[in-house]
Amino acid sequence: GDARGTLFTSRTTQRGTQIPLRARANMASATSLSFRAGAAGASRVTAPAATRRAARKTRAALTVRAHGPGGGVHLDPNESIAPSSAPKGVAGAAILDRDDAPEGERKNVYVETYGCQMNVNDSEVMLSVLKDRGYDETGDMHDADVILVNTCAIRDKAEAKIWQRLAYFKSLRRKKKKSEKPVVGVLGCMAERLKTQLLEADQLADLVAGPDAYRDLPNLIEAVAGTGEKAMNVQLSIEETYADIIPVRKEGAHAAFVTIMRGCDNACAFCIVPYTRGRERSRDPASIEYEVRLLSEQGVKEVTLLGQNVNSYAYQEGETDFLSMLAAGEGAVGDAAAAAADEGRAGAGGEDGAGVMSAEVAAATAAGGSPFSGYAAGFSSRYAPERRREGAVQFAALLDRVAAVDPEMRVRFTSPHPKDFPDEVLEVIARRPNVCNCLHMPAQSGSTATLERMARGYTREAYLTLIDRVKEIIPGCAITTDIISGFCGETEEDHADTVSLMKAVGYEQAFMFAYSERDGTSAARHQEDDVPEDVKQRRLAEVIDAFRTTAAKRQKEEVGRTHLVLVEGPSKKNERELTGKTDSAKWAVFADTPVGIYGGDEDEERTGGEKGVATPRAGEYVAVRVTGCSTGTLFGECLGRTTLTAFNEMHGGARAEAKGAGAVAAAR
């Protein structure tokens, strides 16, 4: 649910399938749209009277064609869906031929992505769906037949930037002939939240599609192009996980995102995500392992598991049968589907996956699920977790299975909730060398009173106890966080508690923001945004200052250490330098010079030995000794090329401590 207003683009060449969506009533999403029956199994949508009057001042009222029920509501699984014109396959899937549009009829689509990593992965999914329906990605918006903006709704600032881009795209349309005007679509969380305003009041978009409607994008685009009417599908689902779609990724990429669950049931008072992303649902673990294996075969060295509440993952066996679909060659699978399915069945749980958990949990996991052992001590939630997690494949087991796929592939995950860090999860992280020792632990506030108003389900004391537990089980683990300053009712004492938390924990990274009220959230409905903006900004500055003070100290402690670094490529500031990431997610910069194989001993540390001298390449692991640092970057010398396994065998982890005081250099 985090967004930083960052622009991402994506490219790829894979395939997808189309499955009818099924859902049920959303817990809190209320629509302002009214529907009346339309033709071709769709619905015509009009805004409330006040919105229609405002629209008529500038232009005649629009006709909006809504695919699916629209309005951000869930359907009961037994309700019927308007029939699709696509051919049906097994289990209702429409099996599409790869690149089925003739070459001369293919069109270009331009995609801009804002917000969190989930949005980046969602854009890769939608590009896969569109690829199969005759659309190729272009990096030039002026050459696009379709312009899609994948949006974020977490804060005002993120939405403001998107409004500006939509206004710009509208100006581009004015300069073109009617037949050449691109279709402009708004996708994702902002589409779910502001559907009426986007289509009817401001008229900046031709179509809107929510996060669960990407399979319907080709139909929405064709509806707009064919009729000139607006189109939308903002239907939320309790089933959609896009498990059968292989996302489109940049060729040669060495890191990838893999979504394992969608939605959020936490309903924190400040957060819009449950209302734009819907209820939690987890993806079949077999499909996750299959995708990770494909990435490993393609040379990917780091995979990040994604979810709005990623460590609440809980999959009940029998919900879907991905391996059977693979064996039958159905869906988005290749020629070796049957072999991959057999390998998936044989490898479920990993080579030594049972060894990372207690015998009781391992036995239950082998049987398909595990007992629910509870949240981290002192944490609670608004729902009864036993009902959905007892007997399910839970996050600890999934993380272990993913880590077993390739011991040379790093595994990260985001964004978690602190409540879902029981000891089982921490033990997997501690015992799997390729699961990164860097945990995001969003505190949001250091005040128990504020945490209660936020409906976070824990106290300051419980959070600090969890941090101590992490440090005990995973020594040296890097910890990052999210902080909101100026939430409803926050006092100076509450704020002081947050500042002291920053100092007590000593975070490696922190994402800190002033509170931004979101319409439709519990806080917007039931609490008063009563902290003045200037006070929010002053408190935010003090929180940032507290973070920087402790972070600078921790950065200087890095000098002299040797880190395992995954090479990303040339430095943006100096082509004669390379950059890469440490296990703790810090950027490291070092000279682009030939080195040998890292030996790990005193005699070979500076030269890397004489064996296999070569310049490190993107996607390779190297050992880097830190010689200096800035606020957010480590600088060092490359000691040699290595592997994840070899480095861990030498040093018992992804870093080696400095050898004596003489190794410490001045920070720069």
Image: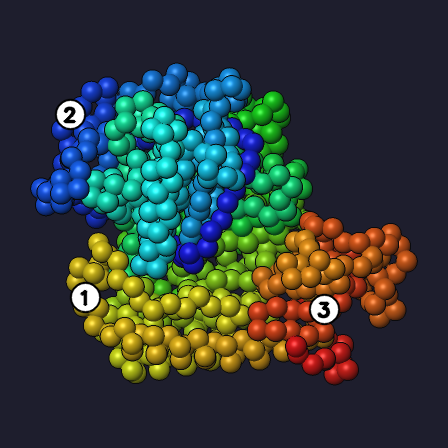
Q: Residues within 10 Å of mark 3 (few under 14, many from 20)?
A: many
The alpha-carbon separation of the residues under discs 1 and 2 comes to 38 Å
User: Is residue 600 left or right of 421 when viewed as pictured?
Assistant: right
The alpha-carbon separation of the residues under discs 2 and 3 comes to 66 Å
Report the residue at 57% width, 29% height from top. 341
Whether residue 438 is visible to the viewer of this picture, yes or no, is yes
Residue closest to the eye, 514 or 174: 174
- Vertical placement of residue 333 versus 190, above or below: above
**Residue where numbered disc 3 is placed:** 636
User: Is residue 31 left or right of 257 when viewed as pictured?
Assistant: left
Amino acid on which the number 2 mark rests in the picture: Ala
Amino acid on which the number 3 mark rests in the picture: Gly
The numbered mark, 2 or 3, whose residue comes first in the sequence reads 2
Quick one: which residue is furthest to the right in this view? 610
Q: Nearer the viewer, mark 3 or mark 1?
A: 3
Q: Which mark is residue 37?
A: 2
Report the residue at 56% width, 46% height from top. 256
The numbered mark, 1 or 2, whose residue comes first in the sequence reads 2
Whether residue 646 is visible to the viewer of this picture, yes or no, is no
User: Is residue 282 left or right of 226 when viewed as pictured?
Assistant: right
The alpha-carbon separation of the residues under discs 3 and 1 comes to 50 Å
